[in-house]
Image: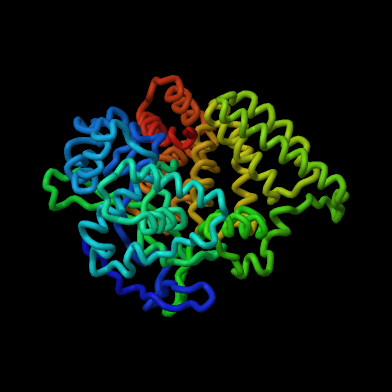
Amino acid sequence: MTLDMDNVEVFDTGVKGRGLRTTKDLCAGEVVLAEPSFAAVVFDSLSQQVCHSCFRRQANLHRCAQCKFAHYCDRTCQTACWDEHKQECGAIKKNGKAPNENVRLAARVLWRIQKDTGIVSDSQLISVDQLEDHMADMPADNLKEIKIDVHNFLDYCPNTRHGVEYISHIFGIINCNGFTLSDQRGLQAVGVGLFPNLCLVNHDCWPNCTVILNHGNQSALNATFHSKRRIELRALGKIAENEELTVGYVDFLNVSTDRQRALKHQYHFDCTCKSCSKNLKDDLMMAAKETEGNKPSDELVKEVEELSLDCLAKVEAARTAGDFHEVVKLCRGGLDKQEPVLADTHLYQLRMLSAASEVLSYLKFFSEAAEYSRRMVEGYIRKLYHPNNAQLGMATMRAGVTHWHAGLIEVGHGMICKAYAILMITHGPNHPITKDLESMRMQTEMELRIFKQNECVYHSMREAALQNKPMGMMAEAVSVENNVKALFHKQ
């Protein structure tokens, strides 16, 4: 796969070391660079549910007849992946089982280095083994895990020509630079891969770029027209020539000290970006509710925050256990305590609203879910997220779908349109989830016209569709809604 890297160049940032900057002015939504993975693997827990070639979640995958571990959409995906899987297949067959995902990824990296060296194309800006491993910065527990992985790797690949130090170096690189791969709808993490050029892009809590996974296209009968899975670095707004390109390694929706702690733990650096240095938006994320100029006491705010943390922990435990009615009960009680004390941009209230709207949607209590999702999106929009943040787009999309399910077509259509505008920038027009949104936008626009012409006709058609008695144009709405039911399911 030939990639155009004329948009970027490597440069010395000073304190942060190497970085990438643009060589020309860029517009919002423009693809800055695209890069196939040097190596990638599916998570252990999803090895039978996700194609090991294109990383799409699929039912009825075909299992590799030799190792009985790898699974594929069809013969086309299996053939496309054979160069990556060939040595893995023999090793798994010989050992009788597959090792964990870290060992499998390290093996694929080392096999490819042995076969193609660490640079596999003219567009690759750095060799894989020249990436930072941060072994010297890792705590003892991380080093112990790497030591165990190296031991397991040597059992898996006993004839490797690489020494323990070099193998440990590769595991350190994976630990610091592995990029999580999502499914075709961008809704669930399904694997991990190494993208050398992407590893050169430094972090900023308020970045000017975002990264999405394009799963490629292997559907054509002629393999000449196939395209590989690849990441795309896309501009979130206007970027001037020679400006450094940045992405967010962690979610912005945490106070600066928590983001700094997470970045130090996982990536071993102290974040000194503008958002962290000036604690930007921390006041909004932890704000108390103000009513006619009056605020609750600090003691009451602290008490409600402590109750919220305890409640959120119980919510997560109940959700993990599949007790969704208990989740709803806990969220309702928590929100009752939060509402008079915490502002609608407070992180704990946003997290409670998110959990409540998601689970209520899953349970098909759409009217209540719609209200919670509206409040949540308003909290996000109210100066917290970047206006083109992908997570804001996804949250707005979920809220729009929830309102659509609840029969609130005007609000639902408006939110779907807003989400579509964001995802056109963050994901582009050809991403599956953008295409889903386009279908929903067109369908809700048509339904909105019917609603404005005659509300009674609209509601009778909608009722018929919900009772599995599709009528006319509403039948298409049911079909589109079925395509996005996965929005309300989590692994």
Q: Is residue 236 above or below residue 338?
A: below
Q: Quadrant of the N terminus?
A: bottom left
Question: Could you say where residue 236 lies in the image, as x and y percent from the top left?
Answer: 46, 64
Residue 295 visible in image: yes
Residue 426 visible in image: no
Q: Please state which of residues 304 and 150 is positioned toward the viewer in this rendering.
A: 150
- Residue depicted at x 28% and y 45%: 158
Question: Could you say where residue 329 lies in the image, as x and y percent from the top left?
Answer: 68, 27
Asked where in the image residue 68 lies, by quadrant, the reply is: top left
- Residue depicted at x 55% and y 48%: 141
Instruction: Please indicate whether residue 301 sits to the left or right of residue 121 in the image.
Output: right
Q: Please state which of residues 389 and 41 is positioned toward the viewer in this rendering.
A: 41
Q: Is residue 392 above or below residue 18?
A: above
Instruction: Please indicate whether residue 108 sits to the left or right of residue 199 in the image.
Output: left
Asked where in the image residue 131 lies, by quadrant, the reply is: bottom left
Question: Could you say where residue 252 lies in the image, as x and y percent from the top left?
Answer: 58, 56
Q: Please state which of residues 461 and 314 is positioned toward the viewer in this rendering.
A: 314
Instruction: Please indicate whether residue 44 sits to the left or right of residue 350 in the image.
Output: left
